[in-house]
Amino acid sequence: MADLPPSPDANGNTDVGPGRELPPGIPRWVKVFGIAALVLVLLVIIIMFVSGGSHGPGRHIPSGDASSHMPP
Amino acid sequence: MALVATSHPVMLAATCHHSTWGATAMTMAPNLRKFVLTAHITSSLGFLGAALAYLGLGISAVTSEDAQTVRAAWIAMEVIGWYVIVPLALAALLTGLVQALGTPWGLFRHYWVIITFVLTLFATVILLLHMPSVSALAEVARAADSAALGRLGGDLFHAGGGLLVLLVITVLNVYKPRGLTPYGWRKQHERRAAPQP
């Protein structure tokens, strides 16, 4: 967030048009981003199932509860 | 959000205006805004850099055949995780919230701000849930023999995934792709319609 948002009064170059009465739809980049994120999440879930439900380094821990470990 | 806006000392220097996000909103003074922005950039890029260092240690743990190197890498990953990555993640999240709510960007007005916030929150929660496992692995590495050390891996999945998320956040923050939410559009519409003082 390095800058302030563009002012609609300054350049008229925002998503609010002068005669616009309805809010704009969801931008295409948001839809593409959402689909890509969904595919990635599904991929991770599938990998987790294929690898036996564990994906983290905790699967190498021979015994004991990893959640009981705190900062050194 | 309101807690941040009302209880944080920086807000003492802020000015109030109405109907921005709810009843009353704060807009930070320019000097204060730059200070918070500096803190946000520093913590966010520090988070990214520390995650890169963590990945480097993880790669070293996977590729090295020297037991001492693997052991040292896991111990360093634990230390970096708790004492560098976790504080920077929390700082990036907090300063990002203050920055969003204390400027006209808002938190719910632009899609890129919402996505950035959700991804940062997601990365921080996963990090906090994952760090106890890293500590457990470092504990194992301290006492393990060479064969056991070879089976520890390098936590590359989390390091790589985390880096990907942080890079996406960085790109969104730099490019700021256009797109107002219905809420943001309504607020901007109201501001245009309001009589100028």
Image (cartoon, helix red, strand yellow):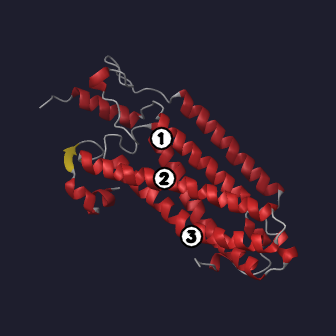
Disc 2 residue type (three-letter): Ser
A14 with respect to B81 (left or right): left
Q: Position of residue B56 (x, y in %)?
A: 69, 58
B67 with respect to B72 (left or right): right
Measured in 3D between alpha carbons, the distance from the residue under mark 3 to the one under mark 1, in whole angstroms, is 26 Å
Q: Quadrant of the N terminus of chain B?
A: bottom left
Per the image, label 1 sits on a secondary structure element best described as helix
Disc 1 residue type (three-letter): Asn
Residue density around tag 1, few if under 14, some if 14–19, many if 20 or more, within 10 Å:
some
Q: Position of residue B168 (x, y in %)?
A: 57, 43
Residue at the image position 65 percent from the left and 68 percent from the top: B77
Label 2 chain ID: B
Q: Are marks 1 and 2 in contact (CB under 8 Å)?
A: yes
Q: A56 and B59: which one is in front?
A: B59
Residue of label 3 = B82
Residue of label 1 = B173
Residue at the image position 54 percent from the left and 59 percent from the top: B124
Residue B28 visible, this orientation = no
Earlier residue among tags 3 and 1: 3
Q: B139 and B185: which one is in front?
A: B139
Residue of label 2 = B44
Residue B51 visible, this orientation = yes
Residue density around tag 3, few if under 14, some if 14–19, many if 20 or more, within 10 Å:
many
